[in-house]
Image (cartoon, rainbow, N blue to C red):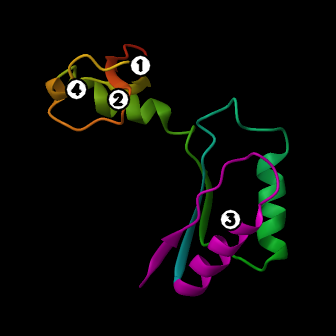
Amino acid sequence: MTRVRFVSSPTGSLHVGNALTAVANRRFGEWMLLPVDDAGAARSVPGGEEAILRDLEWLAVAWDEGPVRQSEPQERYREAADPLGDRFGRTTLLRERVRDPGRCGARLPRGARLRRIDAAL
């Protein structure tokens, strides 16, 4: 069975590129998951998720599971990450000057550096 997904952000109605991706994924896949990327609450607009669901229904794109909101399992993520402690260093890329780009052992985007985040999870 071919499993596909279409991830949307609740920022309002679908634009044509997202609509095409949703239709293509549904045609290709035998089973479709519909996750909603609502983790960035600042980008979400009131009614955005409902607008996307209406658009998908209008396009006759049916999903088998979802919508699954990425913000829902945050506690589960914390519980899974806590036993790891800081062994893997919770980090994020910030657009700042790089003084020693080789210290992390990876190639970073130009002008980025790694910084610890204590409240990330």
Indicate the amino acid at tag 3: Asn
Marks 2/1: CA–CA distance: 31 Å
Q: Which residue is mark 2?
A: 79
Indicate the amino acid at tag 4: Pro
State which tag comes first along the sequence, 4 or 2: 2
Mark 1 secondary-structure assignment: loop
State which tag comes first along the sequence, 2 or 3: 3
Task: From the image, state whether disc 2 or disc 1 is nearer to you.
Answer: 1
Indicate the amino acid at tag 2: Glu
Q: Which residue is mark 1?
A: 96
Looking at the image, residue 38 sits to the left or right of residue 95; the answer is: right
Give, as a single range, the part of the protein colored magenta: 1-28
Residue pictured at 76% horizontal, 68% vertical: 16
Residue 2's place in the image compared with 21, above or below, is: below
Marks 4/3: CA–CA distance: 35 Å
Residue 95 place in picture, x, y as percent? 45, 24
Residue nearer the viewer, 8 or 97? 97
Marks 1/4: CA–CA distance: 11 Å
Mark 4 secondary-structure assignment: helix
